[in-house]
Image (cartoon, helix red, strand yellow):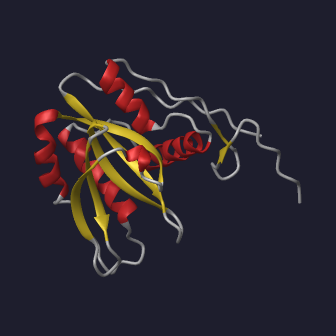
Amino acid sequence: MSSSRSPTPTRNIPPGTLPIILAQFYQPHGGEHWTLSVVESSQSIHTFEIRGNTDSYTYVHDQMKNLDRVESYRGGCHVGNVPKDNVTEMRLKLKEVIINKHEPRWNPQVWVLDAIKLLKDEGWAFTGLTEVFTRRELQKDMLRWDMVEDTVYERVLQELDTGRPVSPAMVALSAEEGKPTSPTAAPKAKS
């Protein structure tokens, strides 16, 4: 049985700004790796992330192309928009987000959540974003990826190209544990 949830909001990308997405990537050892990405085009994506292990975590800004061609990409969430001429400022601001090496409960996902708080202070992240909402949106976009629907990256590229927001495919999360479920999934067997 799936719970009825409000749909993923369609967030506009105002003229003169670039979308900021939280992208998630599969990791074989568990959990997803998160990055923040500013999408200029399919050929120019700024990534902001923490790389390394608990003793070597490092903030990295990089550039890439074609996020949807990265084998481990599993969707994401549109978290804000940055003015086109503020991407360098954003890169420098994100250097200020604290990295807690040797803290067992700290990981790159915590850094991304803290980075979103900083982006909110700058007016570049959507107000009302909470960790619970963000994680739910990530689950829903991973389900879209699994169902071969457009993920947030593909939707923001379409909007950058056409100037019109693209609504995400409707998906439902199961009532148990907030797990994504396919509308055609077989019901769980009772214990």
> Who is closer to the viewer here, 66 or 57?
66
- Res 111 → quadrant: bottom left
Which residue is at a point 39% across and 56% down the rendered structure image? 34
In the displayed structure, 157 sits above or below 66; it is above
> Who is closer to the viewer here, 78 or 184?
184
Quadrant holding the C terminus: bottom right
Quadrant holding the N terminus: top right
Q: Along the horizontal axis of the image, is 82 left or right of 127?
A: left
In the displayed structure, 29 sits above or below 139; it is below
> Who is closer to the viewer here, 124 or 72?
72
Which residue is at a point 44% across and 23% down the rendered structure image? 166
Which residue is at a point 41% across and 78% down the rendered structure image? 104
Image coordinates for residue 10, horizontal then vertical, percent: 43, 26
- Res 43 → quadrant: top left
Image coordinates for residue 182, horizontal then vertical, percent: 70, 40
Q: Is residue 84 visible?
A: yes
> Who is closer to the viewer here, 151 or 69?
69
Q: Is residue 130 visible?
A: no
Which residue is at a point 31% across and 50% down the rendered structure image? 36
Q: Along the horizontal axis of the image, is 113 left or right of 5?
A: left
